[in-house]
Image: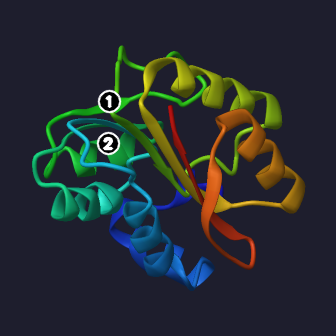
Amino acid sequence: MGQFDWTPEAYLERIRAQVPRYDELQEQAIAAVPFPPDRVLELGMGTGETTRRLLAAHPDAWVIGLDSSPDMVFRVRRDYDDVQLARMEDPLPDGPWDLVLAVLSTSDLTEDQLAALCRRVREQSKSFVIADRFEPNKLKAVLDWSGGQVTWQVDDLAVVAATY
């Protein structure tokens, strides 16, 4: 999605303009969480919108967020303590995790990077929810790599959930 030029203050307005079903995608991602998680790793935490929605549904969850944008990390640390400046391509923080969650944060990854991410998540997590824009072939590949299933899909948006 090339969000590095987006400021945290303008992010929600801009993402809703680019992804008109943004709020529905967020809702469906949280609905796909298979059980109340205790330990959650959010990949691409951005402004903290997904974390906010997750904690509204699962208030006992403890969330660590990763984001590769220093501006986003600086901004979201105002609301959440456990936010790290990191790329998804790098090793994940030590698990095990009950849930790894990625909403609109994986579309810029190459197929090799996304396959490696899915492999690392499977090794360290009990469940994985990924919600993003997918080309048909990439969605099929993510289903194979993650071992998940589509829980919601509209146009090029989909939510994939896997339980391990």
Whether label 1 touches label 2, CB < 8 Å: yes
Q: In the current view of this chain or complex, which residue is farthest to the right?
A: 137
Which residue is found at the position 14% from the left and 49% from the top? 78
Q: Amino acid at mark 2?
A: Val
Dot 2, how many residues are within 10 Å of its Cα: few (below 14), some (14-19), or many (20+)?
A: many
Would residue 138 appear left or right of 26 to someone viewing this image? right
Would residue 96 appear left or right of 37 to someone viewing this image? right
Residue where numbered disc 1 is placed = 84
**Which quadrant of the figure has residue 51?**
bottom left
Q: Indicate the secondary structure of the residue bearing disc 2.
A: helix
Between 15 and 148, the residue placed more toward the observer is: 148
Would residue 8 appear left or right of 32 to someone viewing this image? left
Which residue is found at the position 11% from the left and 54% from the top? 59
Q: Position of residue 160 (x, y in %)?
A: 60, 54
Question: How many numbered marks have been drawn onto this rendered protein structure?
Answer: 2
Q: Position of residue 123 (x, y in %)?
A: 52, 17
Label 1 vs 2, first from the N-terminus: 2
Residue where numbered disc 2 is placed = 73
Would residue 71 appear left or right of 90 to someone viewing this image? left
